[in-house]
Image (tube, rainbow, N blue to C red):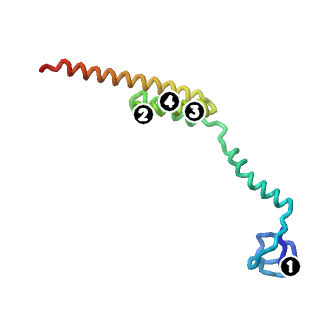
Amino acid sequence: MNFCPQCGTKIVASWNVCPNCGHNLKSERLYQQPTQAQISAQTYSQQKPQDQHYNYRPRSNNTNGIVALICGLLGLFGVLPIVGSIIGIVLGAVGKRNDDDPRMAKAGLVIGIIGIVVWIAFYIYLFAFIFMMFRYIPD
Ligand SMILES: [Zn+2]
């Protein structure tokens, strides 16, 4: 609670002028007598952002799993070969622990591993084919 330095009337901190004597309150420093209610109110307002942060947490969060599944499929079908599969595996592993519903993350992880295996097999086949081609080139 603040008090007018001129007449001692109780005033609210946001007031510019004392309602009793008309003293300009913004021009001078007010002497303050903080009450227990003010201190607890300050403590409450300091704790409030943490509560709000906690409340902002979405109830259903499957973002990792959704992205893992999409990237895993893109990796498997050659839109983002290897890279998509790696993202699918990484986000799938993250989502399996963090997502509220880990089924999509697990699917993304599995599809990512299949994509890696398929594309590594494809590249081995491709290099083997190229190697064979060079072997059969006549001198
Ligand atoms: Zn006053």
Query: Callout 2: helix, strand or loop?
Result: helix
Q: CA distance from mark 1 to mark 3?
A: 64 Å
Q: Which residue is mark 4?
A: 89
Q: Is mark 1 within 8 Å of ligand 1?
A: yes
Residue type, numbered disc 2: Val
Query: Callout 1: helix, strand or loop?
Result: loop
Q: Which residue is mark 1?
A: 20
Query: Callout 4: helix, strand or loop?
Result: helix
> Picture coordinates of residue 21 (x, y %)?
85, 81
> Picture coordinates of residue 5 (x, y %)?
83, 78
Q: Are marks 1 and 4 in contact (CB under 8 Å)?
A: no
Q: Is residue 123 above or below residue 40?
A: above
Residue type, numbered disc 4: Ile
Residue type, numbered disc 1: Asn
Q: CA distance from mark 3 to mark 2?
A: 18 Å
Q: What residue appears at the point 48 percent right and 25 percent down from the top-left corner?
A: 111
Q: Which residue is mark 3?
A: 95
Q: CA distance from mark 1 to mark 4?
A: 71 Å
Q: CA distance from mark 4 to mark 3?
A: 10 Å
Q: Residues within 10 Å of mark 1 (few under 14, many from 20)?
A: few
Q: CA distance from mark 1 to mark 2?
A: 74 Å
